[in-house]
Image (tube, helix red, strand yellow):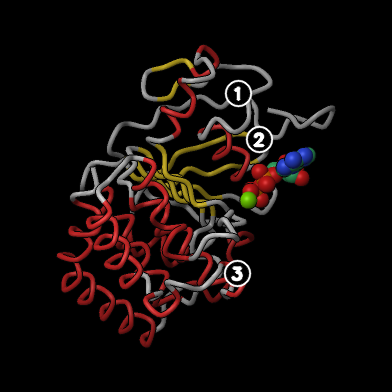
Amino acid sequence: MRYGAGPEVLRNLSFELKPGSFHFLTGASGAGKSTLLKLMYLAHRPTRGVITLFDRNAAALDRDELPEVRRRVGVVFQEFRLLDHLSTFDNVALPLRVNHVEETLVKRHVSELLNWVGLEDQQNAAPPTLSGGQKQRAAIARAVIGRPDLLLADEPTGNVDDAIAVRLLYLFEELHRMGATVVIATHNRSLVERFGHPVMRLRDGGLTVEDRPDWPDSETGPAARPGTQQKARQADAGGQARTFRRSIEDALGQSR
Ligand SMILES: Nc1ncnc2c1ncn2[C@@H]1O[C@H](COP(=O)(O)OP(=O)(O)O)[C@@H](O)[C@H]1O
Ligand SMILES: [Mg+2]
């Protein structure tokens, strides 16, 4: 993959994501994480090579097939891409409304999910009035609410603190538990270690997949290990996750 006449950003990547797998995607800034996710979402065409999504050759999809395939993919964009003229509630409701989910169910699921991500007080707010972290949480809620078969998230916890990041990861975990394939681009080493999924690592245009990540110190810096206080908060988020599992299931479980 190259942009215009630039150098090849990614080359000779060959991998298959098993349905129902969960991977973290990591690599230094500029390594090509966003590019790879955009290729997987079919927002970019590869300069050479083949992308197969849900057993279909992406290059062979015609115009009206593309939206249908994309509907099965939930994306958290690095730059959020919320619709500014819609309220936070309506942004999150969009995937359900596109799928003609009954409005009473839409209300219930969206409220449950906004509650889970801590945006219950921002339902009527327009995205431009939200903070970075709030926008990020709205984008995550929108990406997961339709129970996509494939969830791609580009640094989805880059704007929130660790306790909220863990809470948001539980949402992706729950989606995974329901059968979705999940790829999360992240720099957050403690999150990767905590959740223990295999790591796809981009370096020098190539990709390696590690079941147990081997971290080069240059990518993370010294303070990546969780401290006691952080561990306590994570344990607390784990307890919350169990308590809220029912509401996540309610928010996600019946939206098809
Ligand atoms: N739209 C674009 N046009 C030209 N170059 C781009 C574009 N998007 C990304 N790049 C380049 O591709 C490389 C990988 O970028 P990106 O995929 O955003 O990396 P990451 O998400 O890992 O930080 C970088 O060198 C970046 O400058
Ligand atoms: Mg990026």
Q: Position of residue 48 (x, y in %)?
A: 65, 17
Residue at figure coordinates x 23%, y 57% from the top left = 104
Q: Which comes before the other along the chain, label 3 or label 1?
A: 1
Q: Position of residue 180 (x, y in %)?
A: 29, 41
User: To which residue does mark 2 refer?
Assistant: 205
Of residues 29 and 91, the one drawn nearer to the viewer in this rendering: 91
Residue at figure coordinates x 31%, y 60% from the top left = 171
Q: Which comes before the other along the chain, label 2 or label 1?
A: 1
- Three-letter code for the amino acid on which mark 2 is drawn: Gly
User: To which residue does mark 1 refer?
Assistant: 12
Q: Residues within 10 Å of mark 3 (few under 14, many from 20)?
A: few
Of residues 24 and 171, the one drawn nearer to the viewer in this rendering: 171
As displayed, is residue 229 above or below residue 72?
below
Residue at figure coordinates x 23%, y 70% from the top left = 241
Residue at figure coordinates x 39%, y 77% from the top left = 163
User: To which residue does mark 3 refer?
Assistant: 221
- Three-letter code for the amino acid on which mark 3 is drawn: Gly
Q: Is residue 37 left or right of residue 199?
A: right
As displayed, is residue 175 above or below residue 162?
above
Distance between the alpha carbons at the discs numbered 2 and 1: 8 Å
Label 2 SS: loop
Distance between the alpha carbons at the discs numbered 2 and 3: 22 Å
